[in-house]
């Protein structure tokens, strides 16, 4: 390979890693809702039976390895269970709430005859579930071996106010991507807020360390090209689990790659060494993972099926993000789908 | 006036009366919908205050009382079974409802610290085909405004809560995912689900 060719290949590899890193941080943010917010804490405890809240491991690395292998094994079991896919037509509820585009009628019937006529396992389009579960196991291994130790060290050596400052700085660096997507979504008001926030935080906020704009009532709202495509009418496509990236969909995965091009840092650092080019993306992965680590751990420990819970939360959260949190009812399911049961409220 | 004219006149009069009735009905329909929306909003305001009060008490029993009065537990319980809903034996329904009520009460009680708030302000409502959606802002004890969306169903001339959305996540939908996971792992054995709920 020539020197120029090797350089080109290196550049391509860097871009790929950057795309993966960016997508990973976004997926983590979605799955865990960045910043220890109420909902994910609530949901993750809700997954437990509820009578007693299990203590959350704040170190993030104390989960016994055996549970990891249990997870891998359960993924394997699932694969076996789902080996007999069965298409079943589910009648949409006449006159009911429109079923979201992502809802699938594909069914993955279990091997047991008692539930052989079960119409569907979830409302999420996940035709690659057996394959996704295997990759999910791989990601759990990466999380255990790499991400959690790194996040733990980061949390241990960097004090909370400093971590908040770094998270603010990383978020501020992402503002140009949000700005581009605000415009592409035809929302000039949001673009104006994003631009003003970026200018204020980059100057008065000490290069983004302090979210000074939020104090003035200009709250942050992240947009990405996946959301933009959704606004344009694109459905999410099948649910995917990508190594390192984690939960995503076809639409969101493509969107993340496009966002790399929207990010000025991609071009500013174009001729820099690979480690410099990747630094902003890696910073985003680490800060995001650190902020959602406890929530993910609580969900992992309390959920009867971590894969299904994470998939459900990711899809719901994405719908809410696309709707800018205003119309979170975007994923409403019919309360009593036609033909599934007689009176749903027998009282 | 000939026979045909008489019929035409009667028809015209009938059409007029029918038209007027339809117009009146149509003009009243939005009023009715608005009244229903207002009633739903008032209801959510009351329930929201109840949640804050129960959170301050922090006990499972206070949440259970709140749920019993305001949540449509049978509908939530059956919805949470997803595709397994038709498999629940009729003889086990009441036991299952009781366990679900305890389960949700426990979940809320375990989160009573996070639910302690100052106020809940309703910001709007709208009717969807099988329920009423009420949007609100929950002012948490630390001053943050958390968006909360309520999904209500009409029951007995009033409303009952079917689902609550906190920052984009529907709780009943998430609960459904968990219940289905338990049932799927146990090949649809309801004993496993009951055991999970009793834990």
Image: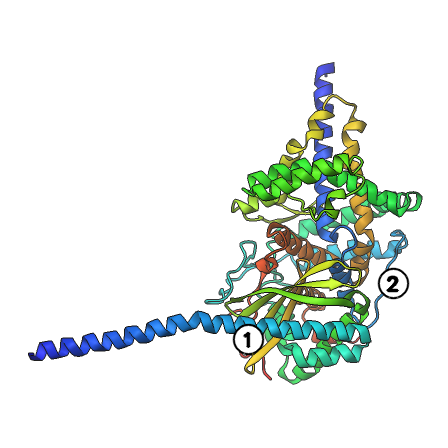
Q: Quadrant of the C terminus of chain A?
A: bottom right
* Distance between the alpha carbons at the discs numbered 2 and 1: 39 Å
Mark 2 or 1, closer to the camera: 2
Residue B135 image offset from top left, x and y in percent: 61, 64
> Is A56 rendered above or below residue A250?
below
In the rendered image, which residue does mark 1 sit on? A341
> Is A178 rendered above or below residue A341?
above
Residue A291 image offset from top left, x and y in percent: 81, 49
> Is B54 rendered above or below residue A268?
below
Tell me what residue is drawn at x 76 percent, y 28 percent: A277
Tell me what residue is drawn at x 88 percent, y 43 percent: A154
In the rendered image, which residue does mark 2 sit on? A55
Tell me what residue is drawn at x 30 percent, y 74 percent: B20
Q: How is the image coloured?
A: rainbow
Q: Is residue B39 visible?
A: yes
Residue B199 image offset from top left, x and y in percent: 81, 73
- Chain under callout 2: A
Q: Of A294 and A114, which appears nearest the observer? A: A294
Tell me what residue is drawn at x 74 percent, y 41 percent: A171
Residue sticking out furthest to the left: B2
């Amino acid at each position: 390979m020539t020197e120029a060719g090797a350089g080109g290949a290196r550049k391509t590899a860097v871009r790929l890693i950057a795309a993966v890193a960016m997508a990973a941080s976004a997926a983590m943010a979605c799955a865990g809702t960045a910043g220890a917010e109420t909902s994910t804490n609530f949901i993750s405890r809700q997954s437990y039976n509820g009578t007693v809240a299990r203590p959350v491991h704040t170190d993030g690395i104390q989960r016994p390895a055996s549970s990891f292998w249990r997870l891998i094994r359960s993924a394997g079991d699932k694969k076996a269970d789902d080996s007999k896919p069965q298409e079943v037509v589910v009648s949409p509820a006449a006159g009911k709430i429109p079923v979201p585009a992502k809802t699938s009628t594909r069914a993955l019937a279990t091997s047991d005859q008692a539930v052989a006529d079960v119409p569907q396992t979830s409302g999420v389009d996940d035709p690659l579930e057996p394959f996704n579960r295997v990759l999910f196991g791989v990601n759990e291994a990466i999380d255990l071996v790499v991400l959690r130790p790194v996040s733990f060290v980061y949390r241990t050596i960097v004090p909370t106010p400093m971590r908040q400052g770094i998270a603010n700085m990383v978020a501020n660096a992402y503002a140009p991507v949000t700005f581009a997507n605000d415009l592409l979504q035809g929302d000039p008001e949001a673009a104006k807020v994003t631009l003003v926030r970026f200018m204020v935080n980059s100057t008065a906020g000490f290069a983004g360390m302090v979210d000074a704009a939020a104090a003035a009532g200009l709250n942050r709202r992240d947009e990405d090209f996946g959301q933009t495509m959704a606004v344009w009418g694109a459905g999410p496509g099948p649910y995917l689990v990508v190594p390192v990236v984690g939960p995503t969909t076809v639409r969101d995965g493509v969107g993340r790659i496009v966002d790399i091009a929207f990010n000025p840092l991609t071009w500013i650092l174009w001729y820099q060494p690979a480690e410099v080019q990747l630094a902003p993306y890696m910073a985003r992965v680490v800060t995001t993972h650190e902020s959602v680590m406890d929530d993910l751990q609580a969900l992992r420990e309390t959920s009867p099926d971590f894969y299904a819970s994470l998939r459900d939360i990711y899809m719901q959260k994405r719908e809410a993000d696309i709707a800018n949190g205003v119309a979170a009812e975007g994923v409403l399911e019919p309360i009593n789908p036609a033909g599934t049961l007689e009176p749903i409220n027998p009282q | 006036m000939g026979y045909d004219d008489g019929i035409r006149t009667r028809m015209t009069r009938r059409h007029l009366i029918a038209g007027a009735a339809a117009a009146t009905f149509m003009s009243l329909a939005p009023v009715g919908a608005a009244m229903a929306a207002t009633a739903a909003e008032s209801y959510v305001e009351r329930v929201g205050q109840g949640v804050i009060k129960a959170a301050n008490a922090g006990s499972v029993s206070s949440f259970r009382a709140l749920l019993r009065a305001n949540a449509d537990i049978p509908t939530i319980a059956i919805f949470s079974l997803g595709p397994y809903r038709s498999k629940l034996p009729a003889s086990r329904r009441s036991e299952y409802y009781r366990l679900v009520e305890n389960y949700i009460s426990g979940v809320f009680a375990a989160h009573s610290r996070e639910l302690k708030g100052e106020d809940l302000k309703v910001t709007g409502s709208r009717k969807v085909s099988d329920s009423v959606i009420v949007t609100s802002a929950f002012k948490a004890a630390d001053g943050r405004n958390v968006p909360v969306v309520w999904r209500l169903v009409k029951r007995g001339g009033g409303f009952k809560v079917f689902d609550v959305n906190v920052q984009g996540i529907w709780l009943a939908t998430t609960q459904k995912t968990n219940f289905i996971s338990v049932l799927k792992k146990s090949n649809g054995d309801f004993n496993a689900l009951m055991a999970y709920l009793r834990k």
